[in-house]
Image: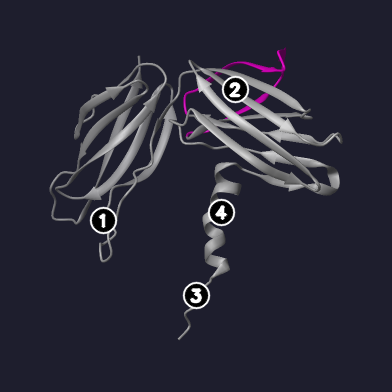
Amino acid sequence: SGVCPHQCWSETMVLQPAIEGLLGFSADAPNRKMTLAPNLPAHWDSLQVSGIRLENQTIDFKFQRKNGLSKYIFHSDSPNKFTLNFNPYFPAGTTIEQVRLNGQYLPVTLFTSQLAINMFTSFSPEKETILEIETKGGISVLPVVQNPKPGDRAEGTRIVSQSYHRGTYTVVFEGVAGSSDNIQVWSDGKYTTDSENINLLKETGNLTTYEIIFPASAEKYQQININWKKY
């Protein structure tokens, strides 16, 4: 009773976080405007998106990052111009050095929060448009991905909060008291931690793997604060 074999309202929640969350897509067709505000995991160095529609036209884009240069290549199949509001997010502590549109300097507006740097700009994509963003620095803990099995309790490590202030990146984790877990941190530049309850396991390029330890306690869950400082 009450079971539907096809629940469209549930299935769309697989797509909506990717379209509106990951890509930050929204459209204003009457005014021929489109917004993309990609908020990608910090360790992603490439992405390809095809078939974004505004009325009867389609836009595709590719993202590539290497050595502090993020390159977005847009392709539009319509001769009719439209405005693209492009507002990508970057990890906390990132410095935007320069932005170029088809090789020409492009002015942008930046907003800084404790979680990220958000860049705002607008332009009208042509058949091929190349946006290049030179960045330096930045740090972000990667989401802790769990692999629960049927019947498992929700006891995995979770990220409670993150903040970045004057070169110090602070993350609050929560987990079962007396347990440990592995986390990964992406960073561009040198960051170090002298916090308790953390051990460095491995460094590979921009990714560092740590073991975090939740002290034993009479309480079921424990929270720990880990600080990384730029040097």
Q: CA distance from mark 2 to mark 1?
A: 39 Å
Q: Please state if 75 lies on the left or on the right of 169 as rendered.
A: right
Q: CA distance from mark 2 to mark 4?
A: 25 Å
Please tell me whether residue 104 belongs to the stretch shown in magenta: yes
Three-letter code for the amino acid on which mark 3 is drawn: Pro
Q: Nearer the viewer, residue 131 or 47?
A: 47
Q: CA distance from mark 3 to mark 2?
A: 43 Å
Residue identifier under label 1:
155
Residue identifier under label 2:
71
Residue identifier under label 3:
5
Q: CA distance from mark 4 to mark 3?
A: 18 Å
Image mark for residue 15: 4
Please tell me whether residue 76 belongs to the stretch shown in magenta: no
Q: Nearer the viewer, residue 33 or 163?
A: 33
Camera-nearest label, 3 or 1: 3
The part of the chain drawn in magenta is 92-114
| Residue depicted at 29% across the width and 56% down the height | 148
| Location of residue 60 in the rendering, given as x and y in whole percent from the top left corner | 67, 36
Specify the quadrant of the image occupied by residue 125. top right
| Residue depicted at 57% across the width and 67% down the height | 9
**Mark 4 Cα within 10 Å, few/some/many (few <14, many 20+)?**
few
| Residue depicted at 31% across the width and 22% down the height | 204
Q: Is tag 3's residue or tag 2's residue first in the polypeptide sequence? A: 3
Q: Nearer the viewer, residue 151 or 122?
A: 151
Three-letter code for the amino acid on which mark 4 is drawn: Leu
